[in-house]
Image (cartoon, grey):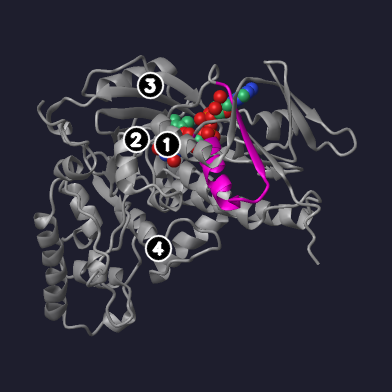
Amino acid sequence: MKDTAQRIREIVIVGGGTAGWMAAASLKQHFGKAPISITLIESSEIGTIGVGEATIPTIRRFYQSLGLSDVDVLRGANATCKLGIRFNDWLRPGSSFVHPFGLFGQDLKGVPFHNYWQRLRAEGETAEIGDYSLGASLAKGGKFTLPSRNPPSSLSVFDWALHLDAGLFAGLMRKVAEAAGVQRIDARITQVNLRPQDGFIASVDLDNGSTVEGELFIDCSGFRGLLIEEALKTGYEDWSPWLLCDRALAVQSESLVGAWREPPPYTDVTAQTAGWRWRIPLQTRFGNGYVYSSRHIDDDAALVELTGAVPDRLLHAPRQIRFTPGRRAKAWNKNCIALGLAAGFLEPLESTSIALIETGIEKIKQLFPDRGFNPAVIDEFNDMSRLEMERVRDFIILHYKANQRGDTAFWRDCQAVEIPDTLKHKIELFRERGHFIRYRWEMFQPASWLAIYAGFEILPKTWDPSLDGADVAALSRALGEMRRSVREAVEAAPTHDAFLDQYARPAPMAAQ
Ligand SMILES: Cc1cc2nc3c(=O)[nH]c(=O)nc-3n(C[C@H](O)[C@H](O)[C@H](O)COP(=O)(O)OP(=O)(O)OC[C@H]3O[C@@H](n4cnc5c(N)ncnc54)[C@H](O)[C@@H]3O)c2cc1C
């Protein structure tokens, strides 16, 4: 029997930021010729948040699925390549390590690599774990090359993401969406109308006097959550007991000073008095910002700290953004699904917000409802969204909790945070047995956890017992070979700037 009578035919997306246009492009492509209309309402008067420039590699799979190539996005979004994140001064002042998108070393005889690394450190070897990672070593060397399609060993495995101009990227998504048939309305929503019988959203009124009806509403209206919160009163889980930062100052700057002239192939994040500062290279400018705790520094002092640290000319006055770290109690409530900032916000430290938009869109496709809105489908969506965000939350909390700075009240308070049991258990198993617990819906793989554990000197109390009788000299030679192979690959790679010249920058116009 063909039961299509209950199908949803009208989707209304509220908001035209990164979340709204990504959802519009991807859902329209997914539904193809199915008779489902998608209307996106945005207000150019209100605008978008205008930040969100660092990504993780899943973004590439996302835009490739829409038919865009890496070169299209590198050129179209003023983008640069990102091999990972470099953390400066987080462990203690003067410290630095890279969290790469890639693996560390080679597992041998079924024993994870970090055991061998630790075994040799006990013998006095000083090589850092990053010396066994091609991704981290390319990043540190300012080099970039495309990963091998058929890596000869795990030593050559790394991935990459982009730093992009969020406005230009949303523009690319809009182009794809509109070409596929998404209707755009530029107007401000003045009222959300609920059905009296069940409180579902029936329509939205616009400031141009019209009303737009829909069956499924996707709320991409940013922090305020115009539908999910202001209309449906869904509630918000506040995670500020774990994540102390609640404000950000963001400013763009010229890229004209010294070594920074060549954009580094990583996001730079540096610990500050009461939070941390980001520096994101685009092809023609930098994005900078200070994410801080308003309980530990006042806005004026934060501004002075940020502007004092940016080495180049600022392109505008810094903008302040206030947020509460946490998540919407239900990402899906009645006939409304929240995506992007409307669904919650942790903080930008591991560039996870856009990735959570991608997984949210995937979940909408997998669990696309009919007009009956079966509660089992909604519960499954909410369960998955909650778990996914809690996993990311735990990973980010680790970065703060593990600091050994203790030089300001902020960093001491981070050390004192009572962490969630899920994270406590994870750390305990790594310390005890070098084991990585993988929970369901985890975005970060063991290699990422290893990068952060090692960067913060959280190490297993010992190595795998099978290495007790290992021939240390042979082991040292084997690991030396691994480092040599990484070094040689880095030496052979072009600089990030040279790579961008070749792939990302339009060829200069031929002389007339
Ligand atoms: C300081 C900071 C740094 C960040 N850095 C990163 C990062 O490096 N990487 C990353 O992945 N993410 C980052 N994020 C998150 C990222 O910016 C967002 O996830 C992303 O931009 C998506 O935003 P959005 O589309 O949900 O909301 P917005 O960009 O705020 O868009 C909201 C949309 O809703 C519309 N709207 C609102 N009200 C109405 C109304 N009444 N009528 C009509 N339209 C309306 C607006 O016009 C706009 O189009 C960062 C966030 C912050 C705060």
- Number of other residues with Cα within 10 Å of mark 4, as a class: few under 14, some 14 to 19, many 20 or more: some
Q: Quadrant of the C terminus?
A: top left
Alpha carbon of mark 3 to alpha carbon of mark 2: how far? 29 Å
Of labels 3 and 2, earlier in sequence is 2
Q: Are marks 2 and 1 in contact (CB under 8 Å)?
A: yes
> What amino acid is labelled 2 in the image?
Ala
Residue receiving disc 1? 172
Q: Which residue is mark 4?
A: 446
The alpha-carbon separation of the residues under discs 3 and 1 comes to 34 Å
* For discs 3 and 4, the disc positioned in front in the rendered view: 4
Left/right placement of residue 282 relative to residue 179 reads: left
Label 2's element? loop
Which residue occupies the foreground of this view, 96 or 64?
Answer: 64
Point out the tag, 4 or 2, that comes first from the N-terminus.
2
Can you give x and y, in whole percent of width and height, for residue 145 in the image? Answer: 20, 53
Residue at the (72%, 52%) spot, across then down: 369
